Image (cartoon, rainbow, N blue to C red):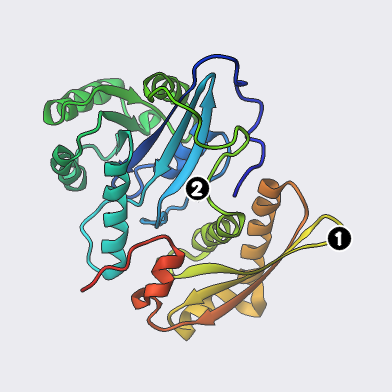
Amino acid sequence: MVDIEAGEGPEKTDGPTRAGFVALIGAPNAGKSTLLNQLVGSKVSIVTHKVQTTRSLVRGIAILGQAQVIFVDTPGIFRPRRRLDRAMVTTAWGGAHDADLVAVLVDAKKGLDDEVLTIFEKLEEVRHPKILILNKIDLVKRDTLLALAQDANAKVPFDRTFMVSAHTGSGVDDITAWFAEHVAPGPWLYPEDQISDLPLRGLAAEITREKLFLRVHDELPYESTVETEQWKDMKDGSVRIEQTIYVTRDSQKRIILGSGGETIKSISMAARKDIAEVLEKPVHLFLFVKVRDGWADDPERYREMGLDFPKL
């Protein structure tokens, strides 16, 4: 588990505690992962320009005074076309139904497009309190934001509306404070210094997948995946990590390797830097690329990603 320090946040004091789960749902690229990292104050979910980067539920833990709020980043919700798409969308709605509170993130620049309206329609099936978060407010005029908030609330009876910029962090503290007051009284569900429930091997693989997509997202399908094959703590305090990038075709393997191995070296350097920051220790990262046909139809791969394998 990720149990590194989350920074100098509010300390727990004597008195009654509160805790609860908040699901972050929305269309692809609404900014859920960026917002989650801001809410937690550390990198727990990867962020790229490629849609559907988040594949399974990622939980980030924030503490404010006596409250522990577990924010659940879910895959973007859209009209599924493939088996992997259906698995991710099903997981996203499952996260919404299982949470105590639901926060619907809307890209204020895109507005209430067809994807958002489809999500709004299905929200009727979610019985938990629902909160609207308009994101990317730094890119939209105030009058447009107010009209958008009014239109959204006319379609769904949201309990509260927030306007934020997940990129800059503007308005994020208001969200954390509100949820800290509205999660139910009860004991904390995770240790005080834990910021995510994702195992370190999994987080390291996700970081490398982020760097992979940032480097070659135009040429690479999002079915590509990364798995941490070996993890060894060295005597000098460093960590040796071996990871494999799996693709579906030889042409994709050549793209990742690049001329003279330049591309994969760049990916490795960027991933090693972020992993070392999370672990707070030196990291020796070794990347390999293999072709694995049909992995998107392999039930074992879905289990490794924390997804249910949907039948055709």
Residue 193 in the figure: left or right of residue 209: right
Give amino acid for label 2: Ser
Residue 45's mark?
2
Q: Residue 235 carries which label?
A: 1
Specify whether 123 is left or right of 10: left
Badge 2: how crowded within 10 Å, few (<14), some, or many (20+)?
Answer: many
Residue shown at the point (53%, 27%) measured from the top left: 63
Q: Position of residue 289 (x, y in %)?
A: 57, 77
For the residue pair 301 and 105, the one nearer the viewer reads as 301
Q: In which quarter of the image is residue 120?
A: top left
Specify whether 101 is left or right of 181: left
Quarter of the image for the C terminus: give it.
Answer: bottom left
Please tell me whether mark 2 sits on a helix, a strand or a loop.
Answer: loop
Q: Which of 13 and 126 is in front in this view?
A: 13
- Kindly indicate whether the residue at mark 2 contacts the one at mark 1 (C-beta within 8 angstroms): no
Residue type (three-letter) at the residue carrying disc 1: Lys
| Nearest the eye: 27 or 303 | 303
Where is residue 210? Give x, y as percent.
52, 57
Q: How crowded is mark 1: few (under 14 residues within 10 Å), some or many (20 or more)?
A: few
Quadrant in the rendering for residue 73: top left
Which tag, 1 or 2, sits closer to the chain's start?
A: 2
Identity of the residue drawn at 26% across and 43% down: 97
